[in-house]
Amino acid sequence: MDVPDGLEVNGHLVVLCSVAGAADAERLARSVVERSLAACVNVVEGVTSFYRWQGRVQTDAERLLIIKTRAEQFEALRAALVAEHPYEVPEVIALPIAAGHPAYLDWVSRNSAG
């Protein structure tokens, strides 16, 4: 994964993925944690998304999955999210974690070992 110059990356990522329904959010979150593709997924309710789709501006209520994992798990995590997601083009965006509490990052590493 390419990282901008000057940004130290410790091998951990936050991956964002939006989904419409509570059932889909729970299903995706549980699936990636049970498969050890992620150590933790927070489901944030109350997200309103504005976006352009098929030439029209849309507005929808969604839930945001905030997924913590290791960078080396990203491709497998991305593939799982895309395969299981109800959207035609799901949002899967990875952000490098530049720094964090060492004990937490160690826990993420141990629990997203695939």
Image (spheres, helix red, strand yellow):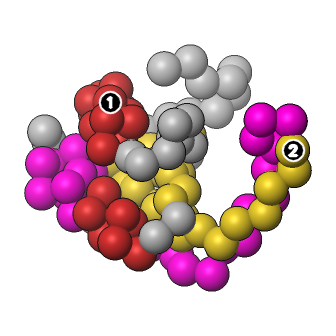
What amino acid type is highlighted by mark number 1? Ala
Task: Indicate whether 33 appears above or below 63.
Answer: above
Mark 2 belongs to which amino acid? Answer: Arg
Q: Nearer the viewer, residue 110 or 19?
A: 19
CA–CA distance between discs 1 and 2? Answer: 28 Å
- The answer to whether 50 appears left or right of 77 in the picture is right
Position in image of residue 67 (x %, y %): 40, 56
Q: Quadrant of residue 72?
A: top left
Magenta stretch contains residue 8: no
37 sits left or right of 90 in the view: left
Name the quadrant containing residue 76: top left
Could one spot residue 105 in this view of the protein? no
Q: Is residue 62 above or below residue 45?
A: above
Residue drawn at the location 36% of the way across and 64% of the way down: 24
Q: Is residue 45 above or below residue 82?
A: below
Indicate which disc residue 59 carries.
Answer: none
> Which quadrant is home to the C terminus?
top left
User: Which residue: 69% across, 21% down?
Assistant: 5
- Residue 56 as seen in the image, left or right of residue 11: right
Nearest to the eye among marks 1 and 2: give it: 2
Q: Which residue is mark 2?
A: 56
Across and down, in percent, residue 44 comes to: 52, 75
Q: Secondary structure at mark 2?
A: strand
Of residue 64 and residue 111, the one placed in the foreground of this image is 64
Is residue 39 highlighted in magenta? yes
Residue count near mark 2 (Cα–Cα under 10 Å), binned few <14, some 14–19, many ≥20: few
Question: Looking at the image, can residue 31 be seen?
Answer: yes
Q: Which residues are magenta?
A: 29-55
Instruction: Write down the residue under mark 1.
Output: 79
Q: Residue at horizontal 87%, vertical 44%? A: 56
Element type where label 1 sits in the image: helix
